[in-house]
Image (cartoon, grey):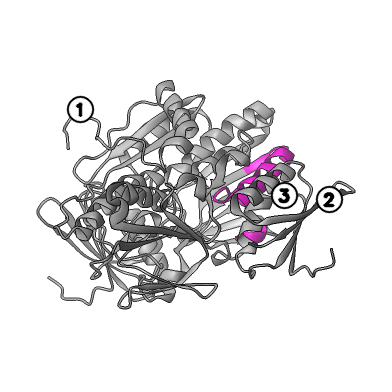
Amino acid sequence: MSAQITRTLDLKGLSCPLPIVKTAQAIRKLQSGDLIEALATDPGSVPDFEAWCTTTGNELVEQSEADDVFRFVIRKK
Amino acid sequence: MTTLNITRQIDARGMPCPGPLMSLIGAIREGQVGDVIEVLSSDTGSRTDIPAWLAKAGHELVEVAEEDGFTRFVVRKAR
Amino acid sequence: MPARVAVLGGGVGGTLVANLLDKALGREARVSVIDPTGMHHYQPGYLYVALGQANGRWLVRDERSLLRRDVDLIIDRAIRIHPEAGTVQLERGASVEWDYLVIATGARLMHDRIPGLVEGAFGFYSLEDAQRLREELRRFRGGRILVGIGGIPYKCPPAPVEFVFMLEEYLRKCGVRDRSSVTLLSPLNRAFTIESASKVIQPILEQRGIELTTFFNVEQVDPSAHTVTSIEGEKAEYDLLVLVPPHQGQSVVTDSDLGDPGGWLPTDRLTLQVKDRERMFAMGDGTDLPISKSGSTAHFEAPVVASRIASLVRGGAPKTNYGGRVMCFLETGNRKATALRFDYEHPPTPPKPSTIWHAAKWMFNRVYWETVPQGRIPEAPRRRRGGNR
């Protein structure tokens, strides 16, 4: 996956549901098709992002974990 | 009866929360020095509460008038 | 051709009015809610998050899940309202046409307006602030806590009083109460806005050893000296400062030249129409009415706005007025609460705090998501001693 990420959000240290709340705020300013990257440490963010993407129709393109940081790449609908 | 240019009118009759004094403080905070604010209050406590705060905060009580079932206060933001 | 109704804001007011309009008008109208994030917050919950009593997860849901199927949801920010043209411009470029507009955009928090507040104070008026305060309280080992008001008007006048009661209980549970003091800095000459409620509250503050400073309207904070100064010229020292931030109407209102100096919409107290605009209505926290900025106000205003718009759509004369009805709980700690119920004609007569009202508040917290935004709480006013509607 080599497409460019338009915006990265550092949400480390924030407790759920703040990571998806802040992502929802930031994604509004992007164009359809843009990619946004969110980095979070709260394990609850994994089900949160999955559920939020399903409900909103934004695509969860990538999800990974390294060194206790969860990384989500989302494509705006 | 003074004829003044009223900058802002607050009709707080029948609205006990946040109440006439609280609404007046908000209008003073949001306004400019020299603003003239008229507050209508059906709360009898305002007759002592409003002048007490004005004295402490240093604003001018221009007029108090008893009307039918309410009191009209005219206040000037002095600082 | 269906009437087009645009609702700005997907909070409790906007969601409820959209659902009621869709219920009342069906195919006679196309209702759209425009909201910047599409996430609906149950704001009364922030207090519990701050005190470690609830997880923020419980407070936020997708707006789409609260709206009836035929109500459109547009996730975008309204940036300009054009009353004559009957349009609203959105941030991403689209323009939405409306025949009737409901402005339920609420209030925004302006932390920057009090010098030193951002660096020096904590709060609980947003999810982020509540979580930050929770972390700070977990680290708190004793000291002087001040709770004050950074601007007027502000949402939920009971909240700072509830906070000091619940905070005092929290400190006891953590075993740091004897090393701490809690002071409520009130803008007025008493603990609470409503005099009859204040008479009930003040003895409880005294019993719990919570101090009260009166006529203290916060002007600025000095984060290095740990002091807070009032517009009345007084200064107080703190180890931990919790402030209600200044509030303002949303920028779309000011940018459209529709608001007063605070950005609040001039609104008729009975019809809820925006002043001089027959097809525009305002409700909830964003109006200039000197009434409580509370969820219950928006909740009771919504049926009036929906009914009036429905009458207009059908070519009839609107008859329903808003009677000023508000209903708020006030938690006094130790599993007790009182209730503040009033309208334009009936002043409040708050009952002595009891476990019944505490249970009622908790029940409301739990059933909110399934009932309030969808209009499932019946509107019939309860009959009370001393009068009826």
Tags 3 and 2 on a common chain: yes
Mark 3 vs 2, N-terminal side: 3
Chain under callout 3: A
In percent of the image, x 51 and y 45: which residue is there?
Answer: C65
State how far apart marks 1 and 2 are (Cα): 61 Å
Q: Is residue C212 above or below residue A29?
A: above
C-alpha span from label 1 to label 3: 48 Å
Residue C168: quarter of image:
top right
* Residue C122 falls within the magenta-colored stretch: yes
Q: Are marks 1 and 3 in contact (CB under 8 Å)?
A: no
**Callout 2: few (<14), some (14-19), or many (20+) C-alpha neighbours within 10 Å?**
few
* Residue at numbered disc 1: C385
- Answer with left or right where residue C127 lies relative to residue C211: right
Res C385 → quadrant: top left
User: In the rendering, which numbered label is found on residue A14?
Assistant: 3
Horizontal and vertical percent for residue B28?
37, 66
Indicate which disc residue B70 carries.
none
Which residue is drawn at the image coordinates 45% and 63% (left, top)? C248
C194 vs C108, left or right, is: left
Numbered tag placed on residue A64 in the rendering: 2
Are the residues flagged by discs 3 and 2 in contact, CB closer than 8 Å? no
